[in-house]
Image (spheres, rainbow, N blue to C red):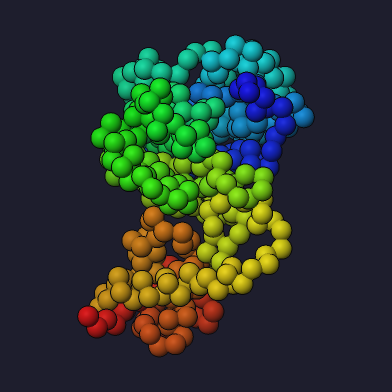
Amino acid sequence: MSDNSFFDEQKEQSLVKSTIVAKYFDIWAKIIISTQKRNPQHSQKIAYIDLFAGPGRYTDGTQSTPLKILTNAINKKDLRERLVAIFNDKDEKNSNELENTIAEIPGIETLKNKPVVHNQEVGEEIVKMFESMNLIPTLFFVDPWGYKGLSLRLVNSVLKDWGCDAIFFFNYNRINMGIDNETVKEHIQALFGDNQTIALKNKLKGKNPHHRELFIIEELCQALKTYGSRYVLPFRFKDDKGKRTSHHLIFVSKHFRGYEIMKDIMARESTSDTQGVPSFEYNPADLLPQLTLLFQLSRPLDDLKVSLLDTFSSRKLTMYEIYEQHNVDTPYIKKNYKDVLRELYDDGSIEAISSKGKTPRKDTFSDEIIVTFPKQEE
């Protein structure tokens, strides 16, 4: 199968991936630009870089991610003035087609900085170039066909600078098969790290497919974090039958605010939730009626109640402090914390009061509410 066959028809999974990236870019850009306006000494440009951009459209005419980003920029004055868009695809046919497609976008001439399209192999030279540069605030998107070109160094080469976040599409099927394949050892080590790859292979021995996936994604997330205090958030895509994992979309940031924004976007794009706790997964099978009681019997909010009482035993914090300190690397979103704290308050398990000394209003639990947790018995 050639790389170009991927663009013959846009599957729902690709649409969701593109939607997540475009939504995050829109919110991220507003925050960065607002900060730039308050601090004129900062660079007054922002960048979007896509190193595996494709031809820009699927053969059915649907816009892929690059065109969504540029169309969004054309419609907003601040983005028209500031956006530096850099695209690349090693396939010359793709890069030429993308260049032509971009030129045909209505209003493309209104962008202050003309979008640039390159035709290069993604490897050591590009990594070294990014490592040697002080980048302007950049949203970096990497969507390789398999694993070649994707590495920890590549992601880190962009994330090192202020305002830079990364999103990459992780082809789980290809990488799962490649871990035990000596002919692609170099690419796997570039993604996980030399020592981590050896440790991962040992962990995977004898594991069933479900546990194998958990170990691989956990190892990848931890490898990304070793480069600094980072927030990593994976979103899983199942195949058309909903049986096997095909890809993961991985978000990486140095800042909690970016993590919080992306978590909310991914939660909304999830095809299922349990007790309001999102699955962080696109699964076509979830779009069918649920016929199993197991789905109903899982009660993650009950687990959250127990965890909060244990974690914050004898402590006094605001609702937002509780949420910020607890939610990282969990599936819980802000609303889950508000709902659970409200329930704990209503049943007398915690004390809660506003900064003005008032009790919480009925059916709400605002960010500034101060919560006092009782001491839990050992």
Location of residue 145 in the rendering, given as x and y in whole percent from the top left corner:
54, 27
Residue at 56% from the left image edge and 32% from the top image edge:
79
Would you say 288 lies left or right of 37 here? Answer: right
Location of residue 68 in the rendering, given as x and y in whole percent from the top left corner:
64, 33
Q: How many marks?
A: 0
Question: Is residue 67 placed above or below 320 in the rendered structure?
Answer: above
Question: Is residue 211 placed above or below 342 in the rendered structure?
Answer: above
Residue most toward the left? 378
Location of residue 280 in the rendering, given as x and y in whole percent from the top left corner:
53, 53
Q: Which quarter of the rendering shows the C terminus?
A: bottom left
Residue at 33% from the left image edge and 46% from the top image edge:
203
Q: Which quarter of the rendering shows the N terminus?
A: top right
Location of residue 162 in the rendering, given as x and y in whole percent from the top left corner:
35, 35
Question: Quarter of the image holding residue 128?
Answer: top left
Residue at 62% from the left image edge and 21% from the top image edge:
2
Would you say 110 lies left or right of 276 here? Answer: right
- Between 192 and 87, which is closer to the camera in this rendering? 192
Report whether residue 341 is seen.
yes
Residue most toward the right? 60
Residue at 43% from the left image edge and 81% from the top image edge:
344
Question: Is residue 121 placed above or below 319 in the rendered structure?
Answer: above
Question: Quarter of the image holding residue 65?
Answer: top right
Residue most toward the front? 206
Report whether residue 255 is seen.
no
- Between 148 and 253, which is closer to the camera in this rendering? 148
